[in-house]
Image: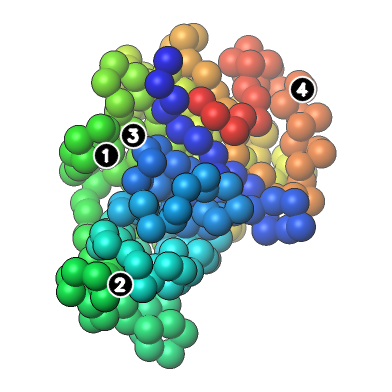
Amino acid sequence: MKELVKVLGASGSKTKSTGTISLQIDEHILIDAGNIFQKYEKDTNEIEHVFISHSHFDHILELPFLIENGFTTRTKQLHIYGLKDTIENIKTFMFNNHIWPDFSLIPLLTTGEKSIVFNEIDYYQTIDLGTLTIMPFPANHIVPTAGFVVEKGEEAFILSSDTYITYELWRIANENKKIKHILVEVSFESALDGLAEVSKHLTPHLLDEELNKLHRDDVGVHIYHIKESSYAQISKELKEYPNLVKFNVDVLPEVL
Ligand SMILES: [Zn+2]
Ligand SMILES: [Zn+2]
């Protein structure tokens, strides 16, 4: 079976041994740019499309180096996709000539085309990239945030992105039978439900309640975006909450 997703980074923390969020969904296409270089196996100049779920730093931090490394030999434009708010923040606070050059104004040396192209996307807009389609939908986080449905042929997965209690994730997962895997964020252990509420993230306890909205038993449910300091406790709690046991929830493996 063709792989649906390869994990380049899936942690909620950047430490000696963990990198933040980046998923390779095709040789040329990524979701989020938290951790590319450690795991991407080819020349990163092959990366042409990056979908950014939201503007938080753990999801965008390697974007400056993605365009800068190998710049003199890059032949393909780098397309960055995000909601209006996400693109505005990346332009205003990152590629603003103060923190990093505005590469959307700098031409590639090889072709003369602008090196970065920013693309604003809307919720429920399906983008067809030939080998796959990707559709953003609303998550419930402290800034406008897109989850994504990625379809490749007859198979699909859904990614929650950073979220608190939500309905769209589960509604779409129930309706779209192509979806075989649900990747859902769990950031903190259940004792930190209060912190999860103010920062709009999930815990095993909250995911246990969320799973009452899932009316399928033929999907894999995988958690990611775990904060390193909560990792051991969350692993323990996966075996304690009834819905987490019922749905056989695991930590997202490196390849799906
Ligand atoms: Zn976030
Ligand atoms: Zn995050």
Tell me which label, 1 or 4, sits earlier in the chain.
Answer: 1
- Do labels 3 and 1 touch, CB within 8 Å? yes
User: Which residue reaches farthest top?
Assistant: 217
Label disc, if present, on residue 135 of the rendered structure: 1
Q: For marks 2 and 3, give the CA distance.
A: 23 Å
Element type where label 2 sits in the image: helix
In three-dimensional space, the C-alpha distance between marks 3 and 1, rounded to whole angstroms, equals: 5 Å
Residue type (three-letter) at the residue carrying disc 2: Glu
| Image x and y of residue 228, in percent | 74, 50
In terms of sequence position, does the residue under pointer 3 or pointer 1 come before the other? 1
Instruction: Name the residue carrying label 3.
Output: 149
Q: Do the residues labelled 1 and 4 touch (CB within 8 Å)?
A: no
Q: Which residue matches tag 4?
A: 240
x and y percent of residue 244 in the render?
Answer: 65, 21
User: In the drawing, does residue 224 fall left or right of residue 42?
Assistant: right
**Is residue 221 in sight in this rendering?**
yes
Mark 2 to mark 4 CA distance (whole Å): 42 Å
Residues at discs 2 and 3 in contact (Cβ within 8 Å): no
